[in-house]
């Protein structure tokens, strides 16, 4: 293989892993960081933080590869996905499976220094990530399954930092579940016409004419449970300021999605990065202020 052909191959793998579109990594990373900071009640152990940062990138990349493998017969018929490497036949199924397996193996080796509970939870997290793409064939709301998969960094963060998974971790996980359903429904609204035609199931289709209401109710559930998290943890003004910023951002999202325009729905989906950042900023600043007082 020449250097030029190798470069082209790596470029295809980069697109397959969506490294050129890091929004998925960020949406997976924010709740993991919430969990790490809440578990440590401030800045977490640096080694654990680095492991989770790298692990998030690796597992999100592996998840994208598995997703495209699962959807390889559907993606060519969807406007947004028809040019993906597997949809165009530029990456073969065997290549994709080997790439996903390699990424998952590296991620597992990365967490080997952590405690046994974290390792056990990682096996379940891997199963959820690998099986999610196939749920779109039979689950009415596969976004809920994705929500569980995207929330598993939270109990893993608590397990790694504290050696256990306390009640607050499950509360935080429930909040994130609502958030994932909200933003991934916005994402599904982009492809709603194509998904109806090819028979894929999504929350946007299941909610029907109530898709916008469904998104906003899930956002409300997310913010409501996050308020409960703050009360349980005894967090202060900075935390609630972060939630207030998140609320403002979510209100803006309503303005983007209320007319169901594809481009604006996709913009709303991308906008959730700032919601996650606002919540994290509130948590981190709250603990920082406490440490300095």
Image (spheres, rainbow, N blue to C red):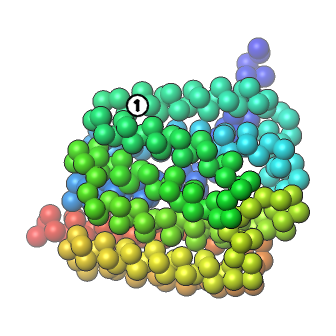
Image quadrant in which you'd find residue 182 = bottom right
The x, y position of residue 70, in whole percent, is 73, 43
The reply to whether residue 19 is in sight is: no
Horizontal relation, residue 221 to residue 195: left or right = left
The x, y position of residue 237, in whole percent, is 25, 80
Q: Secondary structure at mark 1?
A: helix
Q: Nearer the viewer, residue 97 or 32?
A: 97
Q: Nearer the viewer, residue 193 or 174?
A: 174
70 over 266 or under it: above or below: above
Residue furthest left as drawn: 293
Q: How packed is label 1: few (under 14 Cα within 10 Å), some, or many (20 or more)?
A: some
Image quadrant in which you'd find residue 223 = bottom left
Q: How many marks?
A: 1
The x, y position of residue 221, in whole percent, is 47, 78
Q: Residue at x 57, y 56 (%)?
A: 146
Residue annotated with mark 1: 110
The x, y position of residue 31, in whole percent, is 42, 59
220 over 277 or under it: above or below: below
The reply to whether residue 88 is in sight is: yes
Q: Residue at x 69, y 76 (%)?
A: 207
Image quadrant in which you'd find residue 108 = top left
Q: Residue at x 46, y 56 (%)?
A: 151
Q: Quadrant of the N terminus?
A: top right
Horizontal relation, residue 113 to residue 143: left or right = left
Q: Quadrant of the C terminus?
A: bottom left
């Amino acid at each position: 293989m020449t250097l030029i052909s190798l470069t082209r191959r790596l470029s295809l793998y980069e697109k397959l892993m969506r490294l050129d579109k890091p929004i998925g990594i960020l949406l997976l990373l924010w709740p993991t960081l919430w969990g790490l900071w809440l578990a440590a009640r401030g800045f977490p152990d640096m080694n654990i933080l680095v492991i989770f940062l790298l692990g998030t990138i690796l597992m999100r990349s592996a998840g994208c590869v598995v997703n495209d493998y699962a959807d390889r017969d559907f993606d060519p018929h969807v406007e947004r996905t028809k040019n993906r490497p597997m949809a165009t036949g530029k990456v073969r199924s065997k290549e994709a499976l080997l790439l996903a397996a390699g990424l998952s193996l590296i991620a597992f080796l990365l967490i080997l220094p952590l405690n046994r509970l974290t390792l056990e939870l990682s096996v379940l997290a891997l199963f959820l990530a690998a099986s999610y793409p196939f749920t779109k064939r039979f689950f009415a709301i596969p976004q809920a399954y994705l929500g569980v998969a995207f929330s598993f960094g939270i109990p893993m963060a608590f397990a790694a930092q504290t050696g256990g998974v306390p009640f607050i971790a499950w509360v935080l996980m429930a909040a994130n579940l609502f958030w994932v359903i909200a933003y991934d429904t916005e994402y599904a609204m982009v492809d709603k016409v194509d998904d109806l035609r090819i028979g894929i199931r999504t929350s946007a289709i299941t909610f029907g004419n109530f898709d916008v209401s469904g998104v906003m109710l899930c956002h409300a559930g997310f913010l409501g449970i996050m308020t409960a998290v703050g009360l349980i943890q005894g967090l202060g003004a900075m935390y609630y300021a972060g939630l207030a910023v998140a609320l403002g951002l979510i209100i803006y999202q309503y303005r983007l999605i209320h007319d169901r325009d594809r481009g604006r729905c996709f913009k709303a989906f991308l906008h959730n990065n700032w919601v996650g950042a606002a919540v994290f900023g509130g948590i981190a600043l709250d603990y920082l202020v406490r440490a300095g007082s």
